[in-house]
Amino acid sequence: MPRKKWPHLKNGLKQTCPKCGDARLFQKYIVPIEACPSCGQDWRHIRAELAPSWAAMTISAHVVALIYHLFIFDNGWAQWQQTLAAMVIAIIICLIALPPMKGLFMAIAWLNRSEPPQTL
């Protein structure tokens, strides 16, 4: 029976268990729990790899480009001040966006029935 995807993806974005939506998905900043205490889903074999960081950087780049053109560009600041402001904004946005993106990609991997890695 096919699963409805949007509720599970929303749960991942909220950083809760994509399966039940009750328990937190991460025990630390982006360290996933081993198993959900609410539904028992095993999260040890679900890997998000580098996709969340790429998504966070893409979001950050688009937001920083908009902020740069609206507020920072051509305001009389020195070039090093403009660069420093853009870098600080980009880092903050990446740090904020990374956990929801990791939750989203873990939900996507779980929905696609990701299998544990095979040992040789």
Image (cartoon, grey):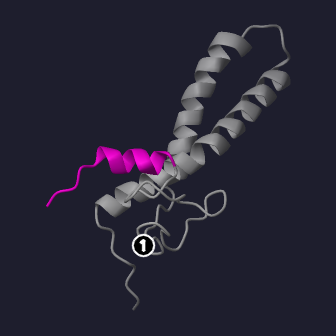
What x and y, as percent, mark residue 6? 31, 44
Q: Is 12 included in the stretch rendered in magenta?
A: yes
- Position of residue 28 in the picture relative to residue 117 (left or right): right
Q: Residue at x 53, y 46 (%)?
A: 100
Identify residue type, mark 1. Answer: Gly
The N terminus: image quadrant: bottom left
What x and y, as percent, mark residue 81? 84, 23
Query: Which of the two residues, 79 or 1, is positioned nearer the viewer here?
Result: 1
Quadrant housing residue 84: top right
Q: Is 2 included in the stretch rendered in magenta?
A: yes
Can you say whether 38 is above or below 70 in the image?
A: below
- Position of residue 3 in the picture relative to residue 30 (left or right): left
Query: Which of the two residues, 52 or 8, is positioned nearer the viewer here?
Result: 8
Q: Give the range drawn in magenta.
A: 1-14
Q: Which residue is drawn at 37% across and 59% down?
A: 19
Query: Which of the two residues, 109 or 65, is positioned nearer the viewer here?
Result: 109
Q: Which residue is drawn at 33% across and 69% down?
A: 114
Residue that badge 1 annotates: 40
